[in-house]
Amino acid sequence: MSAIVSTNVHIWNGILICIIYSKKTACLVRGDSADCSHMSLSEIPRDLPGNITHLDMSHNRLTSLPAASLAPYSGLLNLDVGFNSLTKLDQALCQTLLRLRTLNLERNEVHVLKEQDLSSCVHLTMLNMASNRLTLKAKSGDPFAALENLMTLDVSKNMLVSAKLGSKPQLPNLVALTLSHNAISSLKKDDFYFLSRSPSLFILNLSDLPLKKFEDGCFQPIANISFLKMDGCNLGPQTTQLCTELSDTAIHTLSLRDTSLGKLTNITFKGLDKTNLTTLDLSSNKMNAIEKGAFQWLPTLETLHLEDNNLKHLTKDAFVGLQSLKKLNLRRALVKSKTSSTSIIDDFTFSPLVALETLILEHTAIRSITENTFTGLTSLQYFYVGWSSCTSLKYLTKNTFVSLAASPLRVVNLTGTAIAKIDPGAFSAFPNLTTLLLDYNFISQTLTGTEFEGLGQLEQLFFSNNHQMVELSSWSFVQVPRLRILTLGKTLTGSLDLVPSPFGPLTNLKVLDLSNNNIANINAHMLDGLGNLMVLKMQHNNLAREWKSANVGGPVLFLKELGNLTVLNMEYNGLDEIPTDALKGLKKLKEMSFTGNVLNSLKDSVFEDLLSLRVLRFQKNLITAVRPQVFQPAMENLSLLDMGRNPFDCTCESILWFVTWLNTTKANVTGGKDQFTCNTPLAYFNRTIMDFDPLSCKDSTPFQALYIFSSTVVIAVMLGALLVRFHGWRIQFYWNVLINRTLGFSDAKVEEGREFEYDAYVIHADEDQKWVERSLLPLENEKYVFCVEGRDFLPGTSRLEAIVDNMKRSRKILFVVTESLLKDHWCRGFKAHHALHQVMEASRDSVILVFLQDVHDYRLSRSLFLRRGMLRLRCLLYWPVHKERIPAFHEKLRIALGMTNTLKP
Ligand SMILES: *[C@@H]1O[C@H](CO)[C@@H](O)[C@H](O)[C@H]1NC(C)=O
Ligand SMILES: *[C@@H]1O[C@H](CO)[C@@H](O)[C@H](O)[C@H]1NC(C)=O
Ligand SMILES: *[C@@H]1O[C@H](CO)[C@@H](O)[C@H](O)[C@H]1NC(C)=O
Ligand SMILES: *[C@@H]1O[C@H](CO)[C@@H](O)[C@H](O)[C@H]1NC(C)=O
Ligand SMILES: *[C@@H]1O[C@H](CO)[C@@H](O)[C@H](O)[C@H]1NC(C)=O
Ligand SMILES: *[C@@H]1O[C@H](CO)[C@@H](O)[C@H](O)[C@H]1NC(C)=O
Ligand SMILES: *[C@@H]1O[C@H](CO)[C@@H](O)[C@H](O)[C@H]1NC(C)=O
Ligand SMILES: *[C@@H]1O[C@H](CO)[C@@H](O)[C@H](O)[C@H]1NC(C)=O
């Protein structure tokens, strides 16, 4: 039902952005509502169900709204005609739509509104006329007078010059009136007379008005308002006048953001003392001073926002009078002064704030914390200092927070405050603390346990992003046995092989984050006793060795006691093995991620106990086979599978079960089922595994015979390989020589050689130039001709062209593989890779890899898109460590260069 009708092309910063608007060709009707928005309509459609109650006609091209066109839908309750080009209202509209409750006329061009236009709209509760062109001169009469049930009226962004929307009392049920963004420059005594019988008027929005004058008694008719917003009005010293006018209203909340209040004097808020004001927002006022007594008028104030101001100095009488204040927000309120790089808070500044529960001092530079800076905050529970700097916070000592000792603090947030060291007992002033945040600091010390002295009630300790300089000891957490959440991501130095384990005392722990620490050493008892642990994050460590079967003492099974674990993250750990028993007993595990490892074949029954698993992430591994023996238990109840970017082997053995599972599962598959592609065999290369034909597996008896045959062959080959391994390189050497002598250097036909100009195209990193010159080029004295980048390129040809060209003229492509090569941008360059791929596709056997260093297969496939397994053994050469083996190497090279490229059937 939907078609792409128009496309828009934008050019932004040289980047081409193509936005396609999908436009409906028919209204969407769902239940009793019809959505006809964004359809370029110039009239109301006639073919909608007659019983709809909600009609959305917004974002169309209506220029008029004849009542007759709405006659078929007389039951409408809600009509949205916003974002059209209406210039007036049809007075018969509400006579036709007798039940209309809400009418949205936002963003049209209505400029006159006559008394009759809305005279029948008695049931209307919401009218939005924002962004039209209303002026409402006196002669317009009382256009809103009939709206007896109206509760919200929005006439913001028009051209009104007066707040007077009527001459006689009306709108008896109005709750909220929005007059912002008009041309109203003064509030006259009788402007709000028309609202004098509107006892429920509660919210008045007068933001962004060029107000200059408040006449005496201007708020008198609407003394019931409790929420007044005047953001963006350029009030300045007029604020005093405003507050005087508000003195006998029921005002509760006053928002004066961005009103150019440069300075608070002792009369700015005069008059508000007669009200019950509880919330005052003075953010973004460029305020630079608070005079003594400025807040004496606000004894009932509970919340004060002073965010984003320019205060340089808070004196000790600044907050006098705020005895009811519960929350003070000074985020970015303080700035450094000309004479000092920090702002100053006098001693005892906060002592009038006896009821204060929350103090926000984020993003501020404070000179220092003395023993009396926070004295008197006897109710403070939440203290936020994130991203502030203060010389006293660099080394936390027993005295740093002594001024808070009388505060019943529960949460202290010291995120990003440049803490470098914590002394014993530094937090002992906080016996009731439950949450301590120390993320993003520079703490670098061994945690001996004394640092957390006195924090016996602590339940959450956030200690991430401390630059991996923190070392744990067996006693690090003995003082905080009630911890439920402990985060140590990107904080620890790499070893956690401690006995007893630092986590031993934390029997209540539910969440443990050890991610991003490069941890390489742990022991099997690290998490013993943490039976309550539910979330374990171990991603981005280096635990591959711990789970290798070849590990001295066997694989380290550190998850064995975590019967309540529900989330396990082992992403990016270089894992190539999961021990059979590593995940035993994790019967409650719901979410497991192994993304970004190098896991290939998994042992049968490793996932045996994971019957509760709902989310499984295995992206970016080297999984070739998804067999039921391994995956069935884990996939039984899955709701989300993320397994893309693995080199699947599309054979009956490896993939049949998975394809069948995918075909029937209800689980969500990240990226879609078609994203899984076959890597092998050649016939399926790069095709989605959903193309795999299950019928081809029907008759498997001949395969069994083949299986027996091939396993015999494999065993024979293995024996041979062992023989070769133990008798060393010498045997290989003589074997090679023997072969060459009997069969000649080349198994390639003579004609094959003639098609090519070069025997090999040599790719190497700049750093390996010397090796090429010394060890490879001497072969040119025999009969070989190499194409070496840099040496053999014709000047003037473009680099890429030349590469492709020369590759085509070379019979082999020889990579000199070192770490430098894999890092080389050329190699990773997309175009180069593309070219290379084309040539290689012609025949994989044209590739020779010469390893000067041992390089992980994973890195190889990442950079060159090649894996050792893809090439013939003879095309993989290793540069020997011992000089005496170099002739043997050269011999092998000659054989590799001589091999045919034509695939044997
Ligand atoms: C509206 O009328 C249609 C038939 O025109 C009917 O199928 C539908 O159930 C009615 N919807 C309501 C909410 O009455
Ligand atoms: C305001 O301060 C001035 C002097 O700074 C003082 O004379 C005056 O009495 C104060 N007014 C009030 C209401 O506190
Ligand atoms: C302020 O609150 C008190 C107690 O709740 C009440 O008695 C008083 O009338 C209120 N004052 C105003 C101006 O609303
Ligand atoms: C702690 O402070 C930081 C920085 O201001 C903030 O991002 C974070 O949300 C705060 N956390 C809590 C729990 O208050
Ligand atoms: C800690 O909490 C207990 C009980 O909740 C209370 O009695 C005690 O006064 C509090 N301590 C501080 C320093 O606030
Ligand atoms: C899991 O948690 C429950 C309740 O917290 C607890 O009783 C049980 O002992 C825990 N299981 C294990 C294996 O520790
Ligand atoms: C798939 O995802 C959707 C949306 O997130 C969710 O509602 C649905 O339950 C999921 N399917 C399963 C089988 O969990
Ligand atoms: C998937 O299901 C469809 C229809 O149920 C069937 O035709 C197709 O062969 C199935 N494919 C696999 C791989 O099971």
Image (cartoon, rainbow, N blue to C red):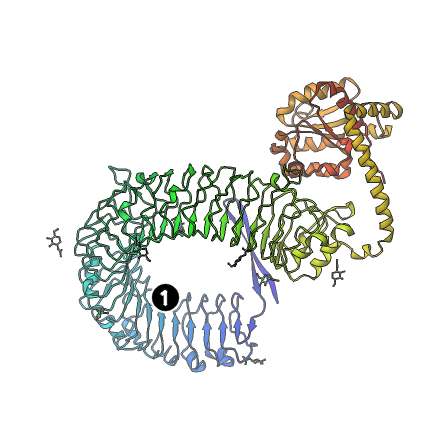
The answer to whether 815 appears left or right of 64 in the picture is: right
Quadrant in the rendering for residue 811: top right
**Quadrant of the image containing the C terminus:** top right
- Given the current orientation, which residue lies at the most extreme front position? 500
Q: Could you tell me residue 573's position as x and y percent?
A: 59, 42
* Residue closest to the eye, 741 or 335: 741
Please indicate whether residue 489 sits to the left or right of residue 143 in the image.
Answer: right
Front-most of residues 453 and 751: 453
Q: Is residue 869 above or below residue 291?
A: above
Q: Report x, y in % for residue 434.
A: 38, 53
Q: Residue type at mark 1?
A: Arg
Residue at position x 38%, y 66% from top? Answer: 130
Q: Label 1, secondary structure: give it.
A: loop
Disc 1 residue: CB within 8 Å of ligand 1: no
Name which residue lies at 34% across and 75% down: 114
Nearest to the observer: residue 702 or residue 789 = 702
- The residue wearing badge 1 is 133
Question: Around disc 1, counting alpha carbons within 10 Å, would you say few (fewer than 14), some (14 to 19), or many (20 or more)?
Answer: many
On the rendering, which quadrant does ligand 8 occupy?
Answer: bottom right
